[in-house]
Image (cartoon, rainbow, N blue to C red):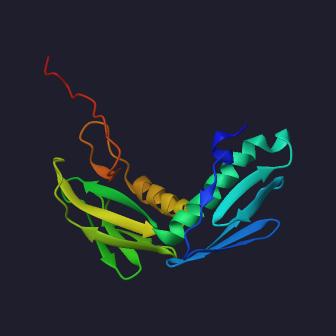
Amino acid sequence: MSRVGKKAIEVPKDVKVTVTDSVIEVQGPKGQLTTKIPAGITFKLDEGTLIAERSDDHDAALHGLARALVANAVTGVTKGFTQELDIVGVGYKAELRGRSIVFALGYSHAIEFVLPEGVTARVEKLQRTIQQYQTSIILGSIDKHLLGQVAANMHKLRKPDAYKGKGVRYANRPLKLKPGKTGK
């Protein structure tokens, strides 16, 4: 049995959930999300809780996945999700221009990253103890999958190097740097 799949999803009072055969629609104060349900998994709405059930043991691998996707949709339309990225390096910077972010990451040209619909961003200078820290990008969205993909695409523009840590970093993940030459 899937431990994650057996957990009930608490649905707040201001969230409306519509369950059909292959799709769950979740509407809340922050917006609306649609989640596709894998075949063999069904959801029952019972007095403010959603329960995921599977037809047989062949669908055991998808049981927890389906429940987690619907739980993320409920959390997204009520609270939303955020992701922070740090830009580290001398001369590295990011600037918000409308629906796009313009990066200067040490290349011969500036990189314009257009934000997809449903993702918001702010560029701020926060208090960090990282050497050569420049700015932070705070991304927000109600869709956790889309937010993670956008953050991964930004991280890929200039991955942090192993010695100085210069590049686009995730703020909540520690980065272990390699030691440089010892001089002998």
Residue at the spot 56% in from the left edge and 60% down from the top edge: 72
- Location of residue 139 in the rendering, given as x and y in whole percent from the top left corner: 39, 66
Residue nearer the viewer, 41 or 6: 6
Left or right of 48 on screen, residue 53: right
Residue nearer the viewer, 28 or 123: 28
The quadrant in which residue 143 appears is: bottom right
Residue 22 in the image: above or below residue 58: below
Residue at far left of view = 183
Residue nearer the viewer, 17 or 45: 45
Residue at the spot 34% in from the left edge and 57% down from the top edge: 85
- Location of residue 175 in the rendering, given as x and y in whole percent from the top left corner: 31, 39
Number of dots carrying numbers: 0
Q: Quadrant of the C terminus?
A: top left
Residue at far front of view = 47
Left or right of 86 on screen, residue 128: left
Q: Quadrant of the N terminus?
A: top right
Residue at far top of view = 184
Residue nearer the viewer, 91 or 172: 172
Residue 89 in the image: above or below residue 96: above
Residue at the spot 19% in from the left edge and 47% down from the top edge: 130
Residue 112 in the image: above or below residue 41: below
Q: Is residue 130 visible?
A: yes
- Location of residue 120 in the rendering, given as x and y in whole percent from the top left corner: 41, 74
Left or right of 25 on screen, residue 96: left
Left or right of 70 on screen, residue 102: left
Q: Is residue 36 visible?
A: no
Residue 18 in the image: above or below residue 159: below
